[in-house]
Each structure stands twice: as structure tokens, then as C-alpha cells.
Image: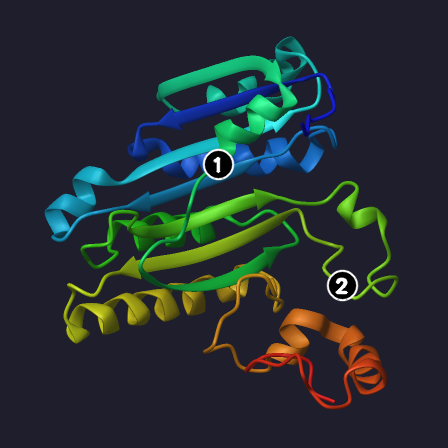
Amino acid sequence: EFQLAPVGNVAIYKVAWDFADAASVLAAMQRVIATAPPELSMRLGMGATGKTPAQIHQNAEISMIGQYFGTTAKLREVIDPLIAAGRATETYIAEVPYWNAQQFFFKTAPIARFAVKSHYVRQPISPEGLQILVRGVERRPGSTNRLGGGVTFFGWGRRINSVAPTATAFMHRDAILLMELDTGWTAEDSTRVEQAQIDWLEELSAEIQPHVSPYAYQNFIDPSLKSWQQAYYGQNYERLVRVKRRYDPGNLFRFAQGIRA
């Protein structure tokens, strides 16, 4: 019988705030993640679900989830200033076995039909930029997708950034955050609703562009992305082309934005 090796306990957390405090929470998140220890992981998102503008407004939410390789006491030292940045509607912090933590984080997302865009954040986004994101979530067009859409930040930096950009195929080594913009719909929605989702996503991405880097995360494939070779791989693309020519000259492994020999 297969058994997982014991790896000790970790501290896990989930916090939600009143959406009216979203801008202040985002600002505090940037301050915390910039100096957080490498033992901390964080995913902070805001989004909205619903079919109508009234439902979007009513269901808009902001929350974060993550884990800390240490005690809950040490975790609270790091994230308490962030928790206090808004009116918390939920605060859950616990110390659990590592494998239990993996079940806590399990989620199937996105679902049904969706579109995604991504940006890297090198420097803290200005208050004006944060307001662009908050207002963007508030004006998301409705759909029948139960996960809706919005903006998600993933903590970056620290050990990821300790590797040189050209040392591996992965070159995104100078950011403090990865930002994902996403939206979803279902087969029940009309083509008009689908197009509204895509238009919203493209418009929000263009609005926030002056506040972020020109690069994108290759695990969030974006079919509409122009110059994807540079956005995903930067200066490493030509070297990856040489690897492709050597090991896959027949182009067995291919897709629309794959490395092209």
C-alpha cells in the first residue's frame, strides 16, 4: 500500500473582506508580499458572479488563501497588517499536516468556457492602477458561469527571483506578483454574452498595461496575445528554438503558441 511520507505541519489561512475595502486591501497586500519571507505563499483575488449588473455588484468579493511553512503565530506576524487593511468578513487560520493542506487548496478552476490574460508586476501598482482593477471587477458583464471572473494575484519573488533569467527556460525572475485576469461563460450564454466577456477582458488588460510589465505567464495561454514569443520567453526564445530543432525536428509536440523550429 502506497503511503505519503510525513513532512510535518504547515499553517494555512483564508481571509475575506468587504469588497468596499478592496483598494486598501490590495495596497496592503503589495506592501506585505514585498517583504514576506519565502516560507509564505499567497493567492489574493477579487471577482464577481451573476447575470445582471445588480447581481455583479451584490456578489463582488475579495479574499486570499495561502500557506506558511511555520507556525500560526509566525504566520500572523506576517499577514495581520493585511488582515487589518479592511473589514474582514472571514478569517480562518490553522496548523495542519502538509497533506491535509493540499486538500484545503484543491479547486477545479476555471470551468466551462473561459478566457485568461496575465501580467507580471515588477513594482507596486499605484493607487490609480488599483482603482482600475477594482472598477473593472465592478463592471464585469454577467454570464451563467458560476465562477464568474475577476483579477487574481499570486505572490512571486524570493526564491523564484534568486535564479538568473537565462539560467533556465523560464525567464520571469524580477517580479513581485503574477496577475491573472479571467472571465467565464457557458454554452447557455448567447454569442453576445460571450463577446461581452472577451471585450471586458481585453479592455481591462489594456487599461492596466501601463502599470505592469510587458511579459505574460506561459501557463496562462492567451490566444489573443501579440508577440507571445517575447511575452512568454523573452531573451530565451531563440535558445529554445535551437533546443526544439535538436530534439523535435519533426514538430511532434506542437500547438498554436508552441516553440517553432
Category of crowding for the residue at label 1, using alpha-carbon neighbours closer than 10 angstroms: few (below 14), some (14–19), many (at least 20): few
The residue that disc 1 covers is 106
Q: Nearer the viewer, mark 2 or mark 1?
A: 1
In the image: residue 260, left or right of residue 179: right
Q: Residue at x 57, y 80 (%)?
A: 255
Which residue is farthest front?
1
Secondary structure at numbered mark 2: loop
Which residue is farthest top?
73
Q: Quadrant of residue 214?
A: bottom right
User: Residue 96: where, in percent of width, then height?
Assistant: 59, 15
Secondary structure at numbered mark 1: loop
Q: Residue at x 47, y 77 (%)?
A: 223
Q: Residue at x 11, y 52 (%)?
A: 52
Which one is in front, 35 or 45?
45
The residue that disc 2 covers is 171
User: Residue 68: where, in percent of width, then height?
Assistant: 65, 24
Quadrant in which the C terminus is drawn:
bottom right
User: Residue 207: where, in percent of width, then height?
Assistant: 42, 65
- Disc 1 marks a residue whose amino acid type is Phe
In the image: residue 47, left or right of residue 220: left
Which one is in front, 199 or 127?
199
Category of crowding for the residue at label 2, using alpha-carbon neighbours closer than 10 angstroms: few (below 14), some (14–19), many (at least 20): many
- Disc 2 marks a residue whose amino acid type is Met
> On screen, 82 above or below 52?
above
Tell me the CA gap for discs 2 and 1: 27 Å
Q: Quadrant of residue 78?
A: top right
> On screen, 43 above or below 254?
above
Q: Residue at x 43, y 24 (%)?
A: 15
